[in-house]
Image (cartoon, helix red, strand yellow):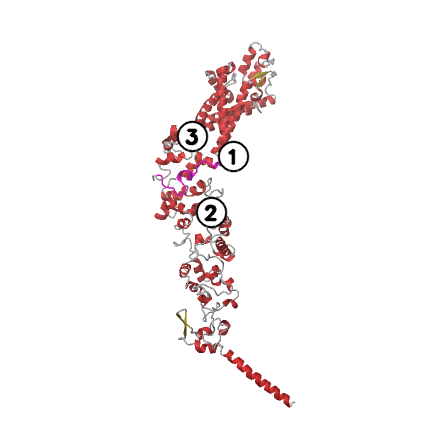
Amino acid sequence: MFLSRIICWRLFIIILFGLLFIVKPLRAQSNDDCLMCHSDNTMTTERNGKEVSLYVNQDLFQHSAHGKLNCVSCHIGFNPEDVPHKENIKPINCLSCHTGAKTQHAFHPQMMTKADGVDGTPDVSCKNCHGTHDISPISEQGGKWSKKNLTASCGSCHKEAEDQYVLSLHAKAFAEGVDGAPNCISCHQSSIVSVNKGKNSLQVKLNQQKLCLSCHLDDPKIRARTTPSAGFIKAFEHSVHGEALSNGNEKAPSCVNCHSNHDIEPATSNNSTINKYNIPNTCGNCHIDIATQYKQSIHGVALLQKGVTDAPSCTNCHGEHNILKVTNPNSPVAYQNVSSEVCSPCHSSVQLVQKYGLPTDRFKSYINSYHGLAMEGGSTVVANCSSCHGIHDIKPSTDPASSVYKGNLAKTCGKCHPGANENFAKGKIHVIVTQKAEPILYWIGTIYIILIITTIGGMFLHNALDFFKKARIKKMKQRGLLPERKHGHSLYLRMTVSERIQHIALAVSFMILVITGFMLKFPNTWWVEHIRSISQNAFEYRSLLHRIAAVVMVAVSLYHLCYIIFTSRGRRLVIDLLPKVQDVKDAIAVAKFNLGISRDKPLLDRFSYVEKSEYWALVWGTIVMSATGFIMWFDNTFIGLLTKLGWDIASTIHYYEAWLAFLAIIVWHFYFIIFNPDVYPMNLAWIKGTLTEEEMADEHPKELERLKSENRMDENHSGEIPSTAPDMENNDVEKINKV
């Protein structure tokens, strides 16, 4: 037992001494042991021909992020007995502890090209940013990587970026402690920088866009503090730039291309890339030729050289985030929108035209011209403002280089009007019909307006008196206060088949001309919009139908001319329609009768003053409308012959003559064939070709009397049966006349 204890004690002593010998070298690698040498600030070594300090500041190290670690935690495999302590000293592998560093330091991917993270470039490695033995904790107030010093720390390498950033909106917001304001790490922890200089990576641009939207669109706190609305920002995704980027075009701009990267400043700042004065250069980074043209234009000179802030820059016309393709119908610079949505807001602005002495009537005159009316009506080929004035290279009309310079107008007009000559420039392009500006057009319009008011007004007054007189007689007959005259059932030929065909062709072509003509003149009225909604090509169909109807009307008129020359009935027709003194007497007598001045109603013949005035007005109107319409149709030829002013005269006459004809048909013709109490609801002669004896007695009693007094007609001559109705008693006639 005793022996056993002795043996155990001996084994314990042996083991204890063995442990002492083993631990001794480990103790030599404690921090204190290492600092016995490395705390000497003169301690150096030579590496690659250069003297390298091996000094470690004990105080800095102990207060560093690694102050609680042993030296050998990083300097693995060092033998303190050997100098150097390791045969092949390799850079410290920070990733052995900081396994997530690759993700957190994506903005410096070049320092981690190998899995061990120790193959950084000479100027980029963990220690270049964080240091060696003086690594400060990120959470340390006032530390190198604290929020306060972060920008300066990054700026030690990225000096230019720092100088730009500290002046930016982001830096100012960050310095003020605004929640969500970005610093270097906030943005660069995403892959938003291309490693290789000059390489425009599509993915990098998409990442940039995603990063910007993550704050300015997706963060409600930031969105509430910034001026642009969510809709305004989101519009970029559907813009021509956003769609190009999404479709894989790496040349398309992202947010950074326009707003810059580190030096983002408000648009009010003179240094901002989106300041109005700088926008041409910003856009010009991609659109080089267009920017050059713009800078030489009247708008560019006014803005960039004269400092006129009201002058338009790129975004005033094209938009900002919502820039759309020019072929997109929703784009303000789309062919059909540029005049109304881009040019008009400035050139129709009372404030701007007064401030800069601009003409006040440019857009109004355009919109009232054929070009403007056709554009409003849906034409896709008619000229808009840019067709004549240019797009980005607009110059004043006094500039010989301008497309609207007087000497260049023939060439400019010739783009749409082949064969245009100098006469195209004779007469104002922008026509405003005033006595001073356009006296000829003014007086033509004034005379026509007076003529329309007096003529149509007289017709309306005549028909109103006629209606009330006939309606009163008809009502008194219904009540038995006046005797009802008995008429036979004979039918009297009024219009032959040929005449009815002529009438129908004339009526249909006239109605089509009225509809299609007023569609051009009033493109935004409700009934025109309904027609236009039927087809996108409604304007082209309108134009075609108008010309077809015009040809039909002219053809019918020529046929009618042949009819009245080469047929006996036609010649008789013209003879009966010739004005006579009796027509004036009949008109006066009818007026007296309708007013109750006279008791005697005149007996009207086959054609009274009613039909005669309408017929010869139709002849006159057809000649005028055909002549002026022909001039307007073949505009290239006739402007070259008659000048632009001559064409405007024809257009003015055509317009007012159309109103006169249309109103005359409505007020005069429709009354006598529809609303006249003696024929209501309609005179069917234009369909059946005949009138009843009662209609003849009411409207053409003199002709009826003549027909009855003549010998009995041949029953087969015109298919008419002679009347056998008794004559009205004299006292009955007298009673009616008294009414």
Q: Earlier in the sequence, mark 2 or mark 1?
A: 2
Depth check: give the residue in front, 281 or 612: 281
Distance from label 2 to label 1 (Cα)?
A: 29 Å
Depth check: give the residue in front, 384 or 656: 384
Mark 1: which secondary structure? helix
Identify the disc placed on residue 635. 3
Residue at image x 49%, y 23%? Answer: 555
The quarter of the rendered structure image containing the C terminus is top right
Going by the picture, which residue comes out furthest to the right?
1
> What is the magenta segment's predominant secondary structure?
loop
Residue 645 in percent (x, y) is at 38, 30
Q: Amino acid at mark 3?
A: Asp
Q: Earlier in the sequence, mark 2 or mark 3?
A: 2
Depth check: give the residue in front, 717 or 633: 633
The answer, for residue 674, to whether it is visible in the render is yes
Q: Amino acid at mark 2?
A: Ile
Residue neighbourhood size for the residue with mark 3, other residues' Cα within 10 Å, grouped as few (<14), some (14–19), many (≥20): some
Residue at image x 49%, y 79%? Answer: 28
Depth check: give the residue in front, 460 or 559: 559
Distance from label 2 to label 3 (Cα)?
A: 37 Å
Mark 2: which secondary structure? loop
Residue 591 in percent (x, y) is at 49, 21
Q: Is residue 656 above or below residue 393?
A: above
Residue 325 in percent (x, y) is at 47, 44
Q: For mark 1, what is the residue?
A: 538
Magenta span covers which residues? 376-397
Q: For mark 2, what is the residue?
A: 323
